[in-house]
């Protein structure tokens, strides 16, 4: 919730890119000119990753009603927006060898590397010094990598079925009433967030142009204001864990029939707020546009800083838990995630986040089979 394929972010339309997170384009598809990238999607990815960092930075603060309402408001749409863009840039994915190679090196390998790194980090600084390394139980935010891997592998299937979005919604509804799914590979999240990915697969450029019209932008202002008011009002009345999509209705202490109803309600709410978010994303190049190509780095790396601050007790300072402290934490989180998207960070860590791994594949693996 990441730049997958620079050729697919061009203004002429997407090709094989994925959004957040995503590997780089295959060598044959990559374009040397960053000017050919669609600034709108890079802007959207950067702004969305900032929202992710803000939400994570707010978690350790004492959740007053205003802060918790803001937290719920952000969580209602920031991951759906990421996932929808990821689906949109997966429209051309097939089982072509070069694309499978990029899926492995750009998603599967970073998942293994960072899942292992996060467990070792938790052992060193966290609350579980004996935490086992298990690739079946994603830690903190690596769930999105394994989810993206699964979603993308199934993309060709969704392009074959007649009614992909309704089918994905039914699957998500069934997941909410199935507590036996368990925690392996965070399958609850994989299934409950699935409709957003499939919807992205079904979208076309004109759909994004539709929500970016001036009339939509104007209408989004009262909609966002009402959403913020509802988030504040509902904070003591609603279990915010619904926004995480990681538990069944029974696990949240609700009757089973609440799961399907909340799936529809959350889907409608998230898509409405996502449309409002997209309506305000600039379509022209901004000072932060180039940072949209490095959102996978910010996504994976900011967790180390947030968790370190929490484990080391930096959040225990009393003055942080007032309005001024919240503003300071917000500014610091925004600055951190911005720095982690920059080119020097990408160059330094590309070998683990976006490895080439030519040694691991046959020499003809990237050739298109005709």
Image (tube, grey):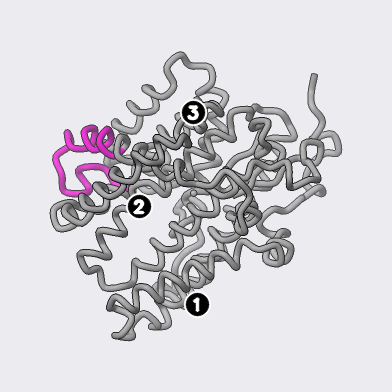
Say the numbered circle drawn on residue 124: 1
In the image, residue 34 lies at what x, y percent? 74, 47
Neighbourhood count class around disc 3 (C-alpha, 10 Å): few under 14, some 14–19, many 20 upward? few
Q: Earlier in the sequence, mark 3 or mark 2?
A: 2
Viewer-closest of 87 and 170: 87
Magenta residue check for 260: yes
* CB within 8 Å, label 3 to label 2: no
Q: What residue do we see at 42% from left, 17% from top? A: 163
Question: Of residues 255 and 195, which is closer to you in this image?
Answer: 195
Say which of marks 3 and 2 sits in front: 3
* Distance between the alpha carbons at the discs numbered 3 and 1: 47 Å
Residue at image x 38%, y 83%?
313
The answer to which of marks 3 and 1 sits earlier in the sequence is 1
**Res. 207 mark:** 3
Q: On the image, which quarter does residue 263 sit in?
A: top left
* Label 3 SS: helix
Provide residue 315's location: percent of width, then percent of height: 36, 79
Q: Magenta residues, as a range?
A: 246-266
Q: Can residue 118 be seen by looking at this rendering?
A: yes
Q: Earlier in the sequence, mark 2 or mark 1?
A: 2
Q: Nearer the viewer, mark 3 or mark 1?
A: 3
Q: Position of residue 32 (x, y in %)?
A: 81, 45
Q: Secondary structure at mark 2?
A: helix
Vertical comparison of 303 with 354: above or below: below
Total residue callouts = 3
Q: Residues within 10 Å of mark 1 (few under 14, many from 20)?
A: few
Distance in Å between CA atoms under marks 3 and 2: 23 Å
Q: Which mark is residue 75?
A: 2
Q: Confirm whether the magenta stretch covers residue 102.
A: no
Circle nearer the viewer, 2 or 1:
2
Q: Is residue 350 left or right of residue 232?
A: right
* 291 relative to 333 in the view: left or right: right
């Amino acid at each position: 919730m990441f730049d997958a394929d620079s050729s697919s972010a061009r203004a002429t339309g997407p090709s094989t890119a994925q959004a957040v997170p995503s590997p780089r384009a295959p060598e044959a598809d990559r374009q040397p000119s960053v000017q050919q990238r669609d600034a709108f999607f890079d802007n959207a990815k950067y702004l969305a990753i900032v929202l992710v960092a803000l939400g994570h930075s707010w978690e350790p603060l004492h959740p007053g009603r205003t802060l918790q309402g803001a937290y719920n408001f952000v969580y209602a749409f920031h991951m759906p927006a990421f996932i929808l863009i990821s689906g949109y840039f997966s429209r051309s994915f097939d089982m072509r060898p070069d694309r499978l190679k990029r899926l492995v090196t750009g998603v599967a390998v970073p998942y293994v590397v960072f899942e292992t790194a996060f467990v070792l980090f938790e052992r060193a600084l966290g609350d579980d010094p004996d935490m086992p390394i298990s690739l079946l139980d994603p830690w903190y935010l690596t769930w999105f990598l394994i989810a993206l891997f699964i979603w993308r592998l199934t993309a060709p299937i969704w392009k074959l079925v007649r009614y992909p979005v309704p089918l994905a919604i039914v699957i998500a509804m069934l997941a909410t009433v199935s507590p036996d799914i368990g925690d392996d590979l965070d399958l609850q999240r994989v299934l409950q967030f699935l409709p957003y990915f499939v919807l992205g697969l079904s979208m076309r450029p004109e759909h994004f142009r539709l929500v970016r019209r001036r009339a939509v932008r104007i209408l989004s202002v009262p909609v966002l204001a009402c959403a913020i008011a509802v988030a504040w009002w509902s904070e003591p009345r609603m279990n915010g864990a619904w926004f995480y999509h990681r538990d069944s209705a029974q696990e949240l202490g609700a009757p089973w029939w609440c799961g399907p109803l909340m799936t529809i309600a959350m889907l409608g709410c998230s898509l409405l707020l996502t449309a409002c978010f997209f309506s305000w994303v600039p379509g022209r190049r901004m000072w932060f546009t180039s940072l949209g190509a490095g959102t996978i780095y910010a996504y994976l790396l900011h967790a180390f800083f947030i968790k370190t601050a929490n484990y080391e007790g930096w959040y225990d300072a009393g003055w942080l838990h007032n309005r001024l402290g919240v503003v300071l934490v917000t500014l610091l989180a925004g600055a951190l995630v911005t720095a982690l998207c920059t080119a020097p960070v990408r160059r330094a860590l590309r070998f683990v986040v976006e490895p080439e791994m030519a040694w691991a594949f046959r020499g003809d693996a990237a050739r298109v089979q005709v």
